[in-house]
Amino acid sequence: MCQHKHNNGTEDESHPWSPFTNIPGSGLPWKVVLARLATNNWIKIRTLSMCCGNYNEPGC
């Protein structure tokens, strides 16, 4: 996962659930959340990276 601070001020611990912890607080409609989850995870797969670069978005 990305090494960055979340909105609550905590550091990213590289936990497997980290990409999903910012979904409830996003305030986005569920269709947008699903689209961003797919997009951000595709970026991570395509670049073989644990970070998509879109901090605090669902999936990152």
Image: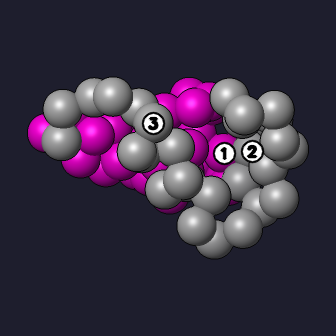
Mark 2 Cα-neighbour bin, 10 Å: few <14, some 14–19, many ≥20 = some
* Disc 1 to disc 3: CB gap under 8 Å: no
Which amino acid type is marked by label 1? Cys
Residue 40 visible, this orientation: no
Magenta-drawn stretch contains 49: yes
Which of pointers 1 and 3 lies earlier in the amino acid sequence? 3
Cα separation, mark 3 vs mark 2, equals: 18 Å
**29 up-or-down from 15: above or below:** above
Residue contact at pointers 1 and 2, CB within 8 angstroms = yes
Please provide the residue range marked out in magenta: 31-60
Quadrant into which the C terminus falls? top right
| Image-based side of 9 in relation to 43, left or right | right
What is the count of numbered marks?
A: 3
SS type, badge 1: loop
Residue furthest bottom in the image: 16
Disc ID at residue 25:
3
Q: Is residue 8 left or right of residue 13?
A: left
